[in-house]
Amino acid sequence: MPPKTQLDKFKQTARELECDESEEAFERKLRKIAKTDNKMDSD
């Protein structure tokens, strides 16, 4: 078996992390981690 390529390693890691390709799941997770602080926006 040839050595794994970087792409193969990436795909394997994504499977292990149970990544989801749906846009809805991405948006939910993005909103969860990317909350803004309104104090910063008032410059």
Image (cartoon, rainbow, N blue to C red):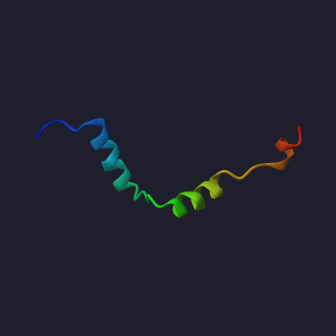
Query: Farthest residue toward the front?
Result: 23
Instruction: Say which quadrant the C terminus sits in.
Output: top right
* Rendered location of residue 28, percent (x, y): 59, 62
Quarter of the figure with residue 7: top left
* Left or right of 20 on screen, residue 11: left
Q: Residue at x 47, y 61 (%)?
A: 22
* Left or right of 33 on screen, residue 10: left
* Rendered location of residue 8, percent (x, y): 27, 43
Query: Farthest residue toward the right?
Result: 43
From this view, report whether residue 2 is shown above or below residue 21.
above
Query: Farthest residue toward the left?
Result: 1
* Rendered location of residue 37, percent (x, y): 79, 48
Q: How many marks?
A: 0
* Rendered location of residue 17, percent (x, y): 40, 55
Instruction: Say which quadrant the N terminus sits in.
Output: top left
Q: Residue at x 66, y 50 (%)?
A: 34
Q: Which of the two residues, 13 or 8, is positioned nearer the viewer here?
A: 8
From this view, report whether residue 22 is shown above or below residue 12.
below
Q: Which of the two residues, 24 or 36, is positioned nearer the viewer here?
A: 24
Quarter of the figure with residue 32: bottom right
Q: Which of the two residues, 23 or 41, is positioned nearer the viewer here?
A: 23
Q: Residue at x 83, y 49 (%)?
A: 38
From this view, report whether residue 10 is shown above or below residue 16.
above
